[in-house]
Amino acid sequence: MPFRTEPAYAHGTPSRTGILLVNLGTPDAPTAVAVKRYLKEFLSDPRVVEIPKLVWWIILNAIILPFRSPRSALKYAMVWGAEGSPLKVWTDKQARLLRGSLGARGHDVSVAYAMRYGNPSIASVLDTLHAERCDRILVLPMYPQYSAATTASTFDAIQSWCASVRNVPAFRFVRSFHDDPGYIDALARQIQGFRARQAIALEPHRKLVMSFHGVPKRSLTMGDPYHCECLKTARLVAERLGLAADDWVVAFQSRFGKAEWLQPYTTATLTALAGERVTGVDLFCPGFPADCLETLEEIAMEGRDTFVAAGGRDYRYISCLNDAPAWIAALATLAESHLQGWPTRAVEPPAAREATKRRAVERGALV
């Protein structure tokens, strides 16, 4: 494999510390062509689909991409905003706010974001950080609960980039933060704030449904901790809110294919709750730090239709953390804890340090 072009090196150039936020990805546009390109990259990852390569190649190219791409494009169009994909908009904002929050705490670090699939790609953003002389990079996948299909796939992409670089930076990785106190507090505050604004009382028959992205059940039996970490997150949030056992339920969404996935399924849960004549449900997706297609279309829209069609009445969707101040503060604290021991302040060149020293002597600050 040929090495990537290295940035021009100059002795004495100060190095920097960088942070790379990584999210799943999004098409470049809500069109069938763009969605097909995105889905092909996403669904070709062996971490995502663990089916024999040849068999899956035929299914993917002959069935899924031709038929699913136009349907998915219509769904993306429903949530696409003036600035683009919601996931990209929120992730970009989170990166900018994180840098500002860390700056307010006295840290001078480069903060960037990348998408595992689509743009900006991990490789292209790492190239940029490398050119900025970041020889220490903290990788923070925006997946609170670890899964091989998401977190490990991000690590694969980092490793692939490293294989083509001569001067490889030092890397640190945040494996998961499903039980991080700041993250749990931010989730609880998001729910509390929503219910307060909506004047929602904690009625005996009102349910909080915490919906996580689903994965095939076989991943659990093969040792993936995702299911356990989702349940722990939900339990900690419920405890933080002081909810009784009957006030909340966990479900799993976005099932794909005919294989059994983690249960209970969100759709089936909503149908069952409607049949139980609960006074209402509040849907929240703790595993998604930013709103995206799976929350805005599948949960906020399709979920409501499912619940109402089954006889339910009051359905309310609680937005993801997005740019909530408590979440940005928690993200900054999480980053700080993983940056310990790395210099995070700008290093002055020798000439600048001498000039600073001379000025201090002239002011009588040094003798």
Image (cartoon, rainbow, N blue to C red):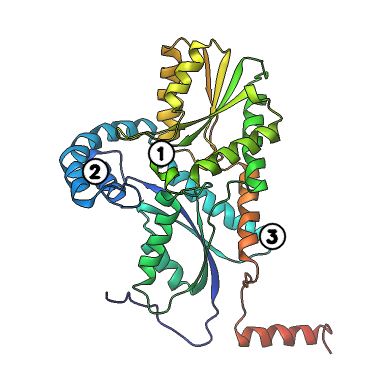
Residue at 46 percent across and 86 percent down: it is 10
Residue at 61 percent across and 62 percent down: it is 338
Q: Amino acid at mark 2?
A: Lys
Distance from the alpha carbon under mark 3 to that under mark 1: 43 Å
Task: Reply above or below: 144 against 76.
Answer: below
Are the residues tagged 3 and 1 within 8 Å (C-beta)?
no
Q: Secondary structure at mark 3?
A: loop
Neighbour tally class for label 3: few under 14, some 14-19, many 20 plus, Cα within 10 Å = few
Q: Which residue is mark 3?
A: 105
The earlier-in-sequence mark between 3 and 2 is 2
The earlier-in-sequence mark between 3 and 1 is 3
Q: Which residue is mark 2?
A: 36
- Locate residue 325 relative to residue 29 in the image: left or right: right
Task: Reply above or below: 279 against 22.
Answer: above
The disc placed on residue 217 is 1
- Select label 3 or label 1 by which is in front: 1
User: Which one is nearer the viewer's eye here, 81 or 95?
Assistant: 95
Point out residue 65 in the picture as x, y percentages from the top left corner: 21, 40
The earlier-in-sequence mark between 2 and 1 is 2
Point out residue 239 in the picture as x, y percentages from the top left corner: 69, 34
User: Which one is nearer the viewer's eye here, 354 or 107?
Assistant: 107
Neighbour tally class for label 1: few under 14, some 14-19, many 20 plus, Cα within 10 Å = some
- Locate residue 197 relative to residue 39 in the image: left or right: right
Distance from the alpha carbon under mark 3 to that under mark 2: 43 Å
Q: Quadrant of the N terminus?
A: bottom left
- Select label 2 or label 1 by which is in front: 1
- Locate residue 190 relative to residue 78 in the image: left or right: right
Are the residues tagged 2 and 1 within 8 Å (C-beta)?
no
Q: Amino acid at mark 3?
A: Arg
Distance from the alpha carbon under mark 2 to that under mark 1: 26 Å
- Locate residue 273 relative to residue 155 in the image: left or right: right
Point out residue 158 in the picture as x, y percentages from the top left corner: 41, 64
